Image (tube, grey):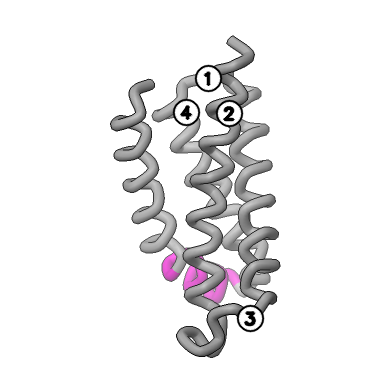
Amino acid sequence: MKPQIRILIYSVLFFIYLTSTQYLLSLGETLKTEPYRTLGCGFAVLNLIYAFLGLKWKPILNIVSSIGIAALALFLALQFANLHLLVKYDPYLVKTAIFANALFSIILWEIVYQIKKKIT
């Protein structure tokens, strides 16, 4: 896949992460579930869609990488928000966690892509 196409896909993925977070949180409130579980499952579904439409790898690799990236990105985003680096700009650290999750997901997808590219 050409770098320009990957950058375009990552940009779209970043925008989808940012816009879908509010809807996933409202869905979690409606279902009365824990927000982290709702976000984790929602981002895993978004990652699955990206993996099957964008990467077109083997199904088991798509599923494992999607769930792993969603869980790891959410964990890293929460750890980054707990550093309190941007308290001046985001007092509740919600936006920080949302942006960090989107960025970590894209970084992890690129890492998985590069590993897969070197293996094949």
Query: On the image, numbered disc 2 is attached to which residue?
Result: 62
**Residue type of the residue flagged with mark 4:** Phe
Mark toward the start of the polypeptide (3 vs 1): 1
* Quarter placement of the C terminus: top right
Label 4 sits on a secondary structure element that is helix
Query: On the image, numbered disc 1 is attached to which residue?
Result: 57
- The magenta segment: 22-31
Asked whether residue 114 is drawn in magenta, I would say no
Q: Of the residues tagged 3 and 1, which is closer to the observer?
A: 3
Q: Mark 3 and mark 1: span between their CA atoms?
A: 38 Å
**Residue type of the residue flagged with mark 2:** Asn
Q: Residue at x 48, y 65 (%)?
A: 99
Few, some or many residues within 10 Å of mark 2 (<14, 14–19, 20+): some
Q: Residue at x 33, y 47 (%)?
A: 12
Residue contact between numbered discs 2 and 4, judged by CB atoms under 8 Å:
yes
**Residue type of the residue flagged with mark 3:** His
Mark toward the start of the polypeptide (2 vs 1): 1
* Quarter placement of the N terminus: top left
**Residue type of the residue flagged with mark 1:** Trp
Label 3 sits on a secondary structure element that is loop
